[in-house]
Image (cartoon, grey):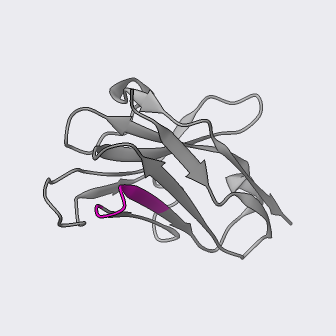
């Protein structure tokens, strides 16, 4: 059973920063999604799994966060991070970590096999 546990959400003013973490029970290609009330879950960022101890990987971002958010991973800790800078009120949502059995990056909800419980991010204006 794959377990994903997110942390790091909270309340921040517009222009501020937060870093989300997702601790996984194994090593997978990972993604971050978000869902605001009344809206569908949308893709935020993804990072591939390359194997071994190297913590790099291909990355992929939604246009709305490109240049502001950075996804990274630490394979030694089985943890993926989402550094969020220059936050905007429209970034307010519940953020979900997801893992997929295949190694490449992916941007659709149906391409991921496992999901965390979510962590709330609220950006005030």
Start and end of the magenta stretch? 75-81
Placement of the N terminus among the 4 image quadrants = top left
**Which residue: 46% across, 55% down?**
63
User: Does residue 80 belong to the magenta stretch?
Assistant: yes
Placement of the C terminus among the 4 image quadrants = bottom right
Most foreground residue, 67 or 33: 33
**Which residue: 41% across, 57% down?**
79
Most foreground residue, 51 or 82: 51
Q: In this view, does 26 lie to the left or right of 120?
A: left
Q: Where is residue 2 in the image (x, y as percent from the top left)?
A: 39, 32
Q: Position of residue 35 (x, y in %)?
A: 65, 37
Q: In this view, does 103 lie to the left or right of 85?
A: left
Most foreground residue, 43 or 28: 28
**Which residue: 39% across, 23% down?**
110
Q: In this view, does 44 lie to the left or right of 53?
A: right
For the view shown, which residue lies furthest in the right direction?
Answer: 125
Task: Give the quarter of the image for residue 99.
Answer: top left
Q: Where is residue 23 in the image (x, y as percent from the top left)?
A: 46, 51
User: Does residue 123 belong to the magenta stretch?
Assistant: no
Task: Give the quarter of the image for residue 40.
Answer: top right
**Which residue: 60% across, 73% down?**
85
Q: Position of residue 27 (x, y in %)?
A: 28, 47
């Amino acid at each position: 059973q794959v377990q994903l546990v997110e942390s790091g959400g909270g309340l921040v003013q517009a222009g501020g920063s937060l870093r989300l973490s997702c601790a996984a029970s194994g090593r997978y290609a990972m993604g971050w999604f978000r869902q605001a009330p009344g809206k569908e879950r949308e893709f935020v960022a993804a990072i591939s799994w390359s194997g071994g101890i190297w913590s790099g990987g291909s990355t992929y971002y939604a246009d709305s966060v490109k240049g502001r958010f950075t996804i990274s991973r630490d394979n030694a800790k089985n943890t993926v991070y989402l550094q969020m800078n220059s936050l905007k009120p429209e970034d307010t949502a519940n953020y979900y970590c997801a893992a997929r059995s295949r190694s490449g990056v992916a941007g659709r909800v149906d391409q991921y096999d496992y999901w965390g419980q979510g962590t709330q991010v609220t950006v005030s204006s």
